[in-house]
Amino acid sequence: MKTSTPSTRLFVIVARNAPIAVIFRRGPSKQVLLIKWNMKDDTFEIGQWLKGRIYERRCDLSPEGDLLMYFAASWRKPYQSWSAVSRPPFLTALALWPKGNAWGGGGQFESRNRILLNHQEWETELAENFSVPKWATVTNFGEYSGGGEDDPVWSSRLTRDGWVLTRVPGKTKPDWTAKVTWVYEPPLLWEKAHPVKPGNYILQMSVLGIDEKDGSWYVAEHSVVSADGTVISLGRSEWADWSPKGDLLYSQGGRLYRLRWKHRVLAPIEATEEIADFSELKFQQCEAPGEARQWPPMRKK
């Protein structure tokens, strides 16, 4: 594998009913690019950039991958921060809810027609000139809607997509002078079983801490544990997941990698393939095409 570019990070959300994913490419820290990934043939469509921040762990894809709910902030007028629905890989909003702060935001697609908005009750009015089609219903996220930060949206989405929280660290006191402000002892641990052979492999995501100086907000590592106790360590990585067919997918330093599932086993780590390198991309202004500026038609159930 190539040497990683520390300033570029990729986070991915995979549609649950289609071979479509959305990649949030961040780097520099106040620039984010949206990329659409066709997972059937590993082709990519470069979309729009945002000069600001997208809180990717508060985002979600519709089941078919044709709509994106996201939470973003530019900290400029008129909205400062906002939640929106768009058609990936474009960020041009079809519906936009002003927020103005960094509490809550974003949400989830309970279904394609039912959107859970992670806002407080008094933050649910659409911005002027935006609307939601009659086939879509918007309700709040639940009891704690708009009250947290990345949670409850992130944990809810992980659980929905097959991850299980298996270890929670004790109370952590911040050390504002340390390399990592909040260090988890032991690390927060999420696990996801292999989709084809769930008893043979477990993918682990260990969150070691939060707020690394000149680094990631989440300090995370991924590894795969086999039934015989063998551990495949990916080390520091921003994202990892199983493909529906059982390949291991992960990102490091602006690059995407695939470790194939062959003959009912995972290939050795040395066989990892780089499938995309987005580390050298630069900001470009991009207008959304006409189709991306309109809600898609209602789908038959």
Image: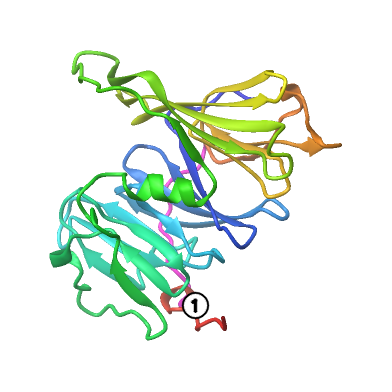
> Residue 30: x percent and y percent?
31, 42
The quarter of the displayed image where residue 276 is located: top right
Q: Is residue 56 visible?
A: no
Q: In which quarter of the image is the C terminus?
A: bottom right
Image quarter where the N terminus lies is top right
Query: Residue 287: percent from the left, percent from the top?
Result: 42, 66
Which span of residues is magenta-colored?
280-290
Count the labels in the image: 1
Q: For residue 202, what is the image quadrant?
A: top right
Q: Does the magenta stretch include residue 194?
A: no
Rendered position, 40 above or below 158:
below
Q: Is residue 25 left or right of residue 171?
A: right
At 68% across and 45% down in the image, what residue appears? 195
Residue 67 visible in image: yes
Q: Find numbered disc 1 in the image and state the secondary structure of the residue it sits on.
A: helix
Q: Which of 106 and 41 is in front in this view?
A: 106
Q: Is 192 rendered above or below residue 140? A: above
Residue 298, position in %: x, y?
50, 83
Give left or right: position of 24 versus 38.
left
Residue for badge 1: 291
Answer with left or right where residue 247 lies relative to residue 64: right
Residue 222 locus on image (x, y percent): 54, 27
Which residue is painted at 40% across and 57% down in the image?
285
Q: Which residue lies furthest to the right in this view?
A: 263
Residue pictured at 67% horizontal, 39% vertical: 194
Left or right: residue 72 versus residue 262 is: left
* 33 or 285: nearer the viewer: 33
Instruction: Pick whichever, 291 or 212, lies toward us.
Output: 212
Q: Which colour scheme is used?
A: rainbow
- Residue 21 vs 241, above or below: the answer is below
Q: Label 1 sits on what residue type?
A: Glu
What secondary structure characterizes most of the magenta part? loop
